[in-house]
Amino acid sequence: MHLNPYGEYAVLLAASLVNDWPADRAGIVARTREFGMTMDFRTEAGDHARTRRVLDEWLPVVDADGPKRRAELLNAQMAAVAAYPRLTDHDDEGWHLHYRDDDRPLPDVLAAVISVGTALHLTTRGMHRLGRCAAGEFAGDPCTAVVVDVTRNGRQRYCSVRCANRAAVRRHRSRAARSSPTVTDSRGTSDGLGPA
């Protein structure tokens, strides 16, 4: 049995491209290989810029307010870029489904794979399992990376351990600052126990 490749890897590929945009078309193709795509992509002028537009059009799905809006955006994207599902057996991958026409250029293939993959990921894992890094909620050095929640418990909020740790430190310092008494001497200087 061949599991559908469109779900998790496709949305992880999209997040990877958004979070670390390759400098050229070759970098995009290399990234698709890292995420398990084996097919060759027809080359056309402007593939790099057109692929960036595909991702920019996908970002409103990431940032959508609520599942209904997210579904509306994804339905519109799939209607524009996906084809009737068809069985295929290429590159010794075994029989599986494609939701796009054959022999399409790189941006068109990625538009179909990413939109259908995102829809499959969200409907099988939960409509809340896509968003921005929660470290962006904190002042200072916010993170805006896309987070694809593939955890068992469905509670991934940060793009990395680094961002999770930074946010925990900020929360701790904020609580400590709110709970520490400020003691000042007659000159108005702090005793070091809290903010002056």
Image (cartoon, rainbow, N blue to C red):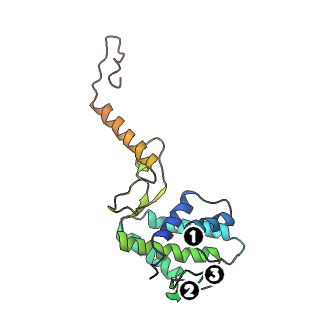
Question: Judging from the image, what secondary structure is the residue with disc 2 in?
Answer: loop
Residue at numbered disc 1: 54
Q: Quadrant of residue 177?
A: top left
Instruction: Judge whether 108 appears above or below 15 on screen.
Output: below
Q: Nearer the viewer, residue 86 or 190?
A: 86
Query: Could you tell me how far apart the alpha carbons at marks 3 and 1 are, in whole angstroms?
Result: 14 Å
Q: Nearer the viewer, residue 177 or 91?
A: 91
Please identify, in this view, whether the residue under mark 3 or under mark 1 is nearer the observer.
Answer: 3
Residue 34, position as x, y percentages in the image: 58, 65
* Mark 1 neighbour density, 10 Å: few (under 14) some (14–19) many (20 or more): some
Residue at numbered disc 2: 89
120 vs 18, left or right, is left
Q: Nearer the viewer, residue 162 or 1?
A: 1
* Mark 2 neighbour density, 10 Å: few (under 14) some (14–19) many (20 or more): few
Which of disc 3 and disc 2 is earlier in sequence? 2
Q: Which mark is residue 73?
A: none
Residue 78, position as x, y percentages in the image: 49, 79
Question: Judging from the image, what secondary structure is the residue with disc 3 in?
Answer: loop
110 vs 116, left or right, is right
Please identify, in this view, whether the residue under mark 2 or under mark 1 is nearer the observer.
Answer: 2
Q: Is residue 73 visible?
A: no
Residue at numbered disc 3: 104
Q: Residue furthest right?
A: 45
Q: Amino acid at mark 2?
A: Asp
Which residue shows up at 70% across the image and 70% down it? 46
Query: Could you tell me how far apart the alpha carbons at marks 2 and 1 are, in whole angstroms?
Result: 26 Å
